[in-house]
Image: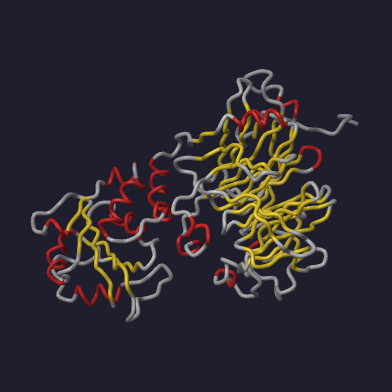
Amino acid sequence: MALHAVFLVGAGAPRLLAALRRGRSVWTADLAGHGGSDPQVRERFAAALRDREGRPPDAHAAGLALATAPAALVPALASAFPGARFVLLDGLRDDLAPARQVAVDGEALLARPRAVLIELCAWLGTDYDQALLGPLEQAAREVRAGQPLASGATDSVPETLARLGGSLLVSTYQAGKLVCARAQPDGTLNTHFRDHDKPMGLALGPDGRLALGTRTEVWDYRDVPDAAAKLEPPDVHDACFVLRNRHVTGDVAIHEMGFAGDELWIVATGFSCLATLDADHSFVPRWHPSWITELAPGDRCHLNGLEIVDGVPRYVTALGTGDTPGSWRAGKATGGVLLDVPSGEVVASGLSMPHSPRWHDGELLVLESGRGHLSRVDPATGETTCVAELPGFTRGLALVGRTAFVGLSQIRESSTFGDLPLTQRLRERQCGVWMVDLDSGETTGLLRFADLVQEVFDVLWLPDRRFPEIAEVGSVSTSDTYVLKAGGLR
């Protein structure tokens, strides 16, 4: 084996190890429980090493062998591993040669993780990747809980929302937020955040219905104009979505959703099927790809996207065509398909992690997320044409006139996304919503989420609702709003 031993020592070492182990060709171990003297430390270290999939290194392994270790064990490690280096989070040591040690400031690691990791990776001789940031940003999120999330937009975004006469909803499951992007009366953009447990698919139905899929539930909202009229400041809000029902599905990995008439359809990714809801069951399976042989949990093909056309489910996307749990992962870079639901036939294949199929203005569009593309698809031939190449993992698509609002994610899991064309093209990816002209393919504006938001799942256009409110469960808008049938007492 050609593994280079590196030991992480001090407060914050487990957090740093969690970040570095997301890199490629990395095996990790934990020696924190060992005392200051361990004559078998070399053997114990080698036996404990595992990669992210839990596999030990083989005889041909090459890369980094990382371990957390107590400060008392450093002399024994330095002796047992003459070529090892040490990353010290509690300051440099006098008993180590300068070339064998580097100090990392724990506070800087959370405040400026990207800069610290780039410098540390250069010292370790390994490639920096954006995927390493995930555990550190999660820790920073916990430290900064309750603080507002940052975003920034070009002036063209609120201008376009105002011109088109609507607003956007954006779900970000990683940050646990539902975001409403709306143009303010002064022409600036307001991003309004609401907390949810893993918000995913969004759907707008008839009569002001709004559905949101979360980790284990579907939230069913209604737009109540009378509630909007009572909100502060006066004469600003033109919609107020108030929660009416919550349907518990269990963790079926809800992805996209859509209304077929007044019936909500969901993609139950964990069960590889399309489903509807009723009052007696977790969900009602209605359709599945032809290659799926049983209804069981396991995410066999990562069915994810759904488009309703003329009141019926018409198109879906999947990342593979396997029939065993997780089988889509092996060929994810080019194994994706776009399916016609009524016939079950494949419309297009060879796609890179497709999401968000949409039928708009007589055109079929899809996001090839693994390439960062917004693409057109010829339904007759299956040929795809790139409309725009964007700087992120494209997922979530709303179309209004000739403008596309495309969700972008940074993607932080190197083991899942490391071999995609997008990650090979871009070391740094963006997160937010990009506006694209469907005719020219040019980017006409962007809403960028900064700081602690890295993933977007869905993007939904709210027509004729320029400044909506999403009422929180404990708010006065929810507790003091009553919607009754006409006629009152009889």
411 to 483, vertically: above or below? below
Q: Splitting the image into 4 quarters, where does residue 20 fall?
A: bottom left
* Residue most extreme to the left: 94
| Colouring style | secondary structure
Residue 153: x and y, percent? 54, 33
**Number of numbered discs present?**
0
Q: Is residue 233 above or below residue 136?
A: above
Q: Quadrant of residue 50?
A: bottom left
Decide which of 28, 23 is in the foreground and name it: 23
Comparing 39 with 19, the one in front is 19
Q: Residue at x 60, y 46 (%)?
A: 407
Residue 433 picture location, percent across and down: 59, 42
Q: Is residue 106 left or right of residue 246?
A: left
The percent position of residue 461, horizontal first and vertical second, equals 70, 40
**Quadrant occupied by the C terminus:** top right
Where does residue 127 sit, x and y in percent of width and height? 35, 59
Q: Residue furthest right?
A: 490
In the image as oriented, which residue stretches furthest toward the top? 234
Q: Nearer the viewer, residue 229 or 160?
A: 160
Quarter that holds the N terminus: bottom left
Question: Residue at coordinates 13% horizontally, 56% vertically from top-left?
Answer: 98
Tell me the residue at 28%/53% (across/down).
120
Q: Which residue is most to the bottom?
A: 59
- Left or right position of 192 against 272: left
Using residue 85 as the reference point, say whether residue 487 is left or right of it.
right
State left or right for residue 319 relative to residue 164: left
